[in-house]
Amino acid sequence: MTTTTPSRGRRRAPSRMERAAGKAAALQRPRVVLALLLLLALVCVMLLDGYLRAEVGGDQRVRTGAGSSDVPDDVLDGGPIVTFRGGQATTVSVPDKTIALTFDDGPNPTWTPQVLAILEKYDVPATFFLVGSMVSRYPGVVRDMVEQGHEVGIHTFTHVDLSYQSDARVRREMEQTQLALAGAAGITTTLFRAPYSSETDAIDNYSWPVYKKLGQDGYTSVFVDTDSDDWKRPGVSKIVQWATPKKNKGASVLFHDAGGERSQTIEALPRYIEKMRAKGYTFTTISGALEKQRQTPAGVPQAEGTRLQAAHREATGAILYVGKALVAAVAVAEWAVPTLSAGLLVVGVAVLGRFGMMLILARRHHRLRNRRRFSWGPEVTRPVTVIVPAYNEKECIANTLDSLAQSTHPIEIIVVDDGSTDGTADIAESLGMPNVRVIRQENAGKPAALNHGVRSARHDIVVMMDGDTVFEPDTVRQLVQPFADPEVGAVAGNAKVGNRTTVIGAWQHIEYVMGFNLDRRMYDLLRCMPTIPGAIGAFRREAVLQVGGMSEDTLAEDTDITIAMHRAGRRVVYQEHARAWTEAPGSLKQLWSQRYRWSYGTMQALWKHRKSLTDKGPSGRFGRVGMPLVVLFQIVTPVFAPLIDVFTAYSMIFIDFKAALLAWLAVLGVQLVCAAYAFRLDREKYRYLLMMPLQQLAYRQMMYLVLIHSCVTALTGGRLRWQKLKRTGEVGTPAGAR
């Protein structure tokens, strides 16, 4: 027996565990921040993708029937090109027998390349008015367009009617499209065509201020003379007919290379080009039409200084690099959101499948174990050893030992004091219980304390419990009965939350009954129990020694020893009638600390025992059945489960609130059914289920972050020692705990 005496000085040096925990806590803060940043990045990616698809900030309003009294008559009756040089609005018409071929709403990865191929075949230049969100999604198409010598203009970023938008929104629509063009093709443009615009006589009192403001910013607004109306899909002949100017006049002609199914446009375009050339027409861009119109009547160009420059400008400096960053971010969103959507489907199926499997197997387990004729074998009546590892448990140790003193099964109790500094060992000794031994050791952690207890045990069955846990009088007797079966090497008991009167306690109570104990029934039938809870578990002493005792390799020594039992060929079962009442964390900070240790420790244990995947026999059974289930249900599914809530919130805000709410309520209903059945099996009061909706909204989100934190730690490295949570000692007798 190792005995140490803590210093009695006014100030003591921190223990080994406290120093390690302090260092570990400092190391974990950046990982918590990183986990939160990952979640924030997910939200940002979804918002960006929603913005690109007009789900976020979309505005479908289109103004019609407004007056035009504020619009100058020479603009209403003028040509399709409106410039604002010197602050004065001037309209320009396309020269006779000239077609300024324009396309709206692109780029589109299907139709635009086909349009470009036709234009290249006939050597026809065109002007494409592009939607910025589409530019950022399909930058390669725009790059090809510019390299082929075509001209591009702005058609806003999200295809909204600018007459309804604020000055800030108008400026943002233009600037974002310029950034997209810079990132896609390294250029900016001075050309603009408003969505839903047609001829100049459609300018009204609401849109005119927008055109004037953009004109002051250097933009040339482009309208149409002749509309093919190809978006109506009237047939190839109609498209060609409607796009043909009358009386050999020049025209700005509108087609669409996106915004819908454009096969008729693709078929009509070659016919149209051939028809217009046969009539003696030439094709040009908007800038080309402007330049041609500004030539002298004799056909001699004006002086170089008065010639209109091309619409394109080379993007340099910040706009170029910010544009490339925008295109890169959109590429990430374009890849991530479909992937996340697929993950959401997988998670949804896995979650519902898990609930179904738990209900079926839990019912079967309950009926099997509660049959009148069910028996593990001859009743186990021989004494057992109960090991209580304790570190600074002065608030709880008396209640723990008092509950053991009422045991209906013969026991010896070993309290292993792990270097406590609060007098825990003294309290245990002062109770004067004849069957209690107190072993003192230097602070070395919970696994070391348990191993010390196992080596000192006098009996062949050892029960392990926490120093903040209380047993019912019949708990030990119920817990050891499965050892009548010689195949059984370990038994998991039914851990319950004793301090369930608070909101946090009630949430954990639901989790223990539904998430832990319902799971254990399922795993028991499948013979792949992953964890014997530290609060209540029993082992054959020789089996523990055979696998090397409680390991310090992981933070979850209970999961580690359980898997080791499986690999050693020992059967691990669940005894629902052996109940223990434990004090759950009372604050969110302590809860985070505990669940982080559990989650990360489980990952460590699974990695440590990864060879069971290829093992044969019982070890291989756990590797082939238990490990995939644990990875799927306790790591992969929970990691991706936030997608359900994120997508639900996203859908509620930006898409369809009613449909999203109904879907969320349906999932909640399934969970309530499972929880109600679990409460029925454990004979718990249903009133706690009233907390479940709030648990889904708050508590579950925290558990997601804890798991993400654990995954980040697993990827970046890190290690914690046995952590001590602050206890209140409020869990007394089991009757009071109910």
Image (cartoon, rainbow, N blue to C red):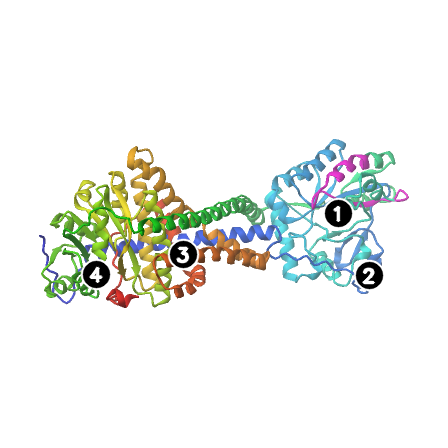
Residue 509 horizontal/vertical position (percent): 35, 61
Disc on the earlier residue, 2 or 1: 2
The kind of residue on which mark 4 rests is: Pro
Bin the neighbour count of mark 2 within 10 Å (Cα to Cα): few under 14, some 14-19, many 20 and up.
few
Bin the neighbour count of mark 4 within 10 Å (Cα to Cα): few under 14, some 14-19, many 20 and up.
some
- Tell me what residue is drawn at x 58 percent, y 59 percent: 658
Boundaries of the magenta span: 246-273
In space, the residues marked 2 and 1 are separated at their CA atoms by: 24 Å
Asked if residue 272 lies in the magenta stretch, the reply is: yes
Tell me the element at label 3. helix
The kind of residue on which mark 2 rests is: Pro
Disc 3: which residue: 677
Question: Could you tell me if residue 315 is visible in this image?
Answer: no
Bin the neighbour count of mark 3 within 10 Å (Cα to Cα): few under 14, some 14-19, many 20 and up.
many
Tell me the element at label 2. loop
Disc 1: which residue: 308
The kind of residue on which mark 3 rests is: Tyr
Q: Is residue 692 left or right of residue 560?
A: right
- Select label 4 or label 1 by which is in front: 4
In space, the residues marked 4 and 1 are separated at their CA atoms by: 96 Å
- Select label 4 or label 2 by which is in front: 4
Name the foreground residue: 135 vs 321: 135
Which labelled disc corresponds to residue 473? 4
Q: Quadrant of residue 725?
A: bottom left
Which labelled disc corresponds to residue 72? 2
